[in-house]
Amino acid sequence: MALPALIEDSQRKWLFKVTAHSKEADLNLCLLGFFLGSGMTTLELCRVQVGDVITKSGELSKCFAVRGDVERDFYLANVDLKALVKRYAEKRRKDGDHPDYFQGHDPCAPFFTRTNGDAFNVKRRTTTAGNASYHCNALNNHVKRLLSDGGIERPSILSGRRTFAVRLKRHGVDVPTIHLMLGNKDLSTTYRLLDSDPVDMGAIAEMAF
């Protein structure tokens, strides 16, 4: 199976520039920020709640637990990502005026919602083997559409995780730490996402002559 597309810095700049002019731009930019900068799967992004990201006082959380198969924390520390979150949170449709809400937002509600209030819902299905399987096709399709509109060829919902992993590796982060941040069960899955980094291959080719 081919590796998901790796989104290089030049492509990312263009992607965000195009997305800034899209409908629901604040939502879309925030989604892309998490997609590329958190290592979370789209299913995990669907499960992010208001109370994970925003405190009752309206401040941003410094850290929250990712709702995935592997327990791990996500640290909301990146300055650019925090700016996208704040901008979206200010525009996010209010859930009501209940006294336990966080400035009009239900802490247990999905963080990512459309301007009409609709969320990208997680749906359950039963496999042929009788096991429960969960998916979020609405968000998958939405993200792939954003990537495609931004000029990314072969848009994949795994492009964010591969880009996240490769960027960390290029900055000298060791594979076990990247593996932990991705929340993969199998280390081979992490190595696969890091496989054939075009920058590394280019450096090798440059040294050959």
Image (tube, rainbow, N blue to C red):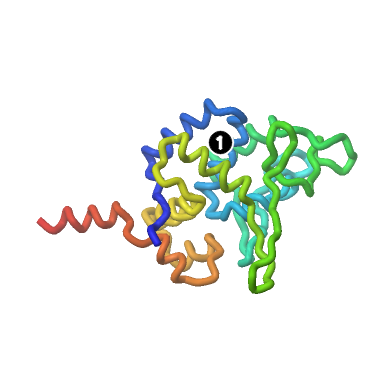
Residue shown at 65% from the left, 34% from the top: 88
Tell me the quarter of the picture where residue 128 sits.
bottom right
Quadrant placement of the C terminus = bottom left
Farthest residue in the top direction? 21
Farthest residue in the left direction? 209
Residue 32: percent from the left, percent from the top? 54, 41
Determine whether, in the image, residue 6 is placed left or right of residue 89.
left
Residue 143: percent from the left, percent from the top? 54, 43
Farthest residue in the front direction? 128
Residue 43: percent from the left, percent from the top? 62, 54
Element under disc 1: helix
Determine whether, in the image, residue 20 is placed left or right of residue 166.
right
Tell me the quarter of the picture where residue 56 sits.
top right
The residue nearer to you, when weighing 37 against 186, is: 186
Residue 82: percent from the left, percent from the top? 59, 40
Residue shown at 75% from the left, 36% from the top: 117
The residue nearer to you, when weighing 77 against 190, is: 190
Above or below, 196 relative to 114:
below
Above or below, 98 relative to 185:
above
Determine whether, in the image, residue 192 is placed left or right of residue 42.
left
- Crowd rating for badge 1 (residues with CA inside 10 Å; few <14, some 14–19, many 20+): many
The residue nearer to you, when weighing 85 against 32, is: 32
Instruction: Check disc 1 and report the residue beneath it.
Output: 29
Residue type, mark 1 in image: Leu
Residue shown at 73% from the left, 45% from the top: 50
Residue shown at 53% from the left, 26% from the top: 21
